[in-house]
Image: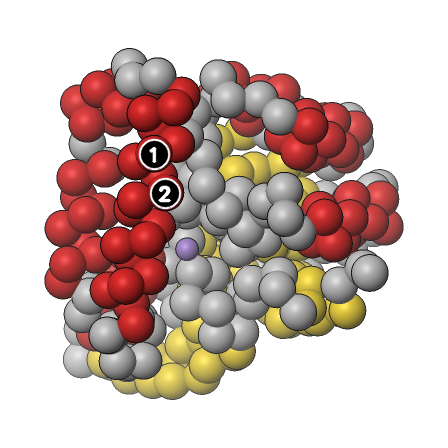
Amino acid sequence: MPSRILLISDLHLEESRPDITASLLRFLEDNRDRCDALYVLGDLFEVWIGDDESSELTQTVSAAFKDFSQTTQLFFMHGNRDFLLGNDYIKLCGGKLIQEPYILETGSQSIVLVHGDCLCSDDVDYMKFRDMVRQQQWQQEFLGQTLEQRREFAREARKQSQLANANKTSSIMDVNQDEVEKLLRTAAKTTMIHGHTHRPASHQFTFDTDGHTLQATRVVLGDWDKFLWYGEVSYDTVELKQLPLSS
Ligand code: MN
């Protein structure tokens, strides 16, 4: 059977959007036994304050992934909203945590996978926040707080980010092309898949490395707000696909 690998990101699951959760359950059911691996490239949840916060939503989701993982490999990467997703929960889901940048080797292809926020280097304030919350010490201290304290922090951080983003130009919140090319050069690859920006597209461009001009592809997965977006990688192709969200 030819290989078929699926990638999703930016579902932003939350209690107030049962339609998105239903779409995920349907997506998993539809692709059970019909793909070799599923990669979740971050922001699966709208907010994640620690694996010790359990709810009907988190339990429904982990049970569905666990079932899916019986026959299919499942990988999770952190996003900027669920960077605290831990091994306890990922184990409940039957998945494996991967770190970015991750190199997906399949068929004739070798593809760089990242969530995408690391490419948005023009957003200097956000990059500072990112550096802080990705530090082990900060995370240990944060996880040491009560659930209520953590919820409060998450609410406040979200509010601040919405306020700040309202004043940022559209280009600041998109990827920086130099950053994209730098990552491809470092990884010595010509294909990249990421999410985060909520700007689903497949970009073709050229870049120079070691005196050569290479043709490159950057596929951006979409967020699951109005459509269910996914990437599909087969032997020698990468496709971006969309389906309507379940009602
Ligand atoms: Mn994101």
The disc label shown at residue 240, or none: none
User: Ligand 1 lies in which image quarter?
Assistant: bottom left
**Residues packed near mark 2 inside 10 Å, few (<14), some (14 to 19) or many (20 plus):** few
Q: Which residue is mark 1?
A: 152
* Residue plotted at (52% across, 78% down): 202
For ligand 1, tell me if the residue under mark 2 lies within 8 Å: no
What percent of the width, then of the height, locates residue 206? Answer: 34, 84
Q: Which residue is mark 2?
A: 155
Between the C-alphas of marks 1 and 2, the distance is 5 Å
Q: Quadrant of the C terminus?
A: bottom right
For badge 2, the amino acid type reads: Arg
Q: Is residue 165 visible?
A: yes
Q: Is residue 101 visible?
A: no
Using the image as rendered, state which of residue 86 and residue 45 is in the foreground: 45
Q: Quadrant of residue 169?
A: bottom left
* Residue plotted at (69% across, 63% down): 228
* Residue plotted at (17% across, 23% down): 137
What percent of the width, then of the height, locates residue 59? Answer: 68, 26
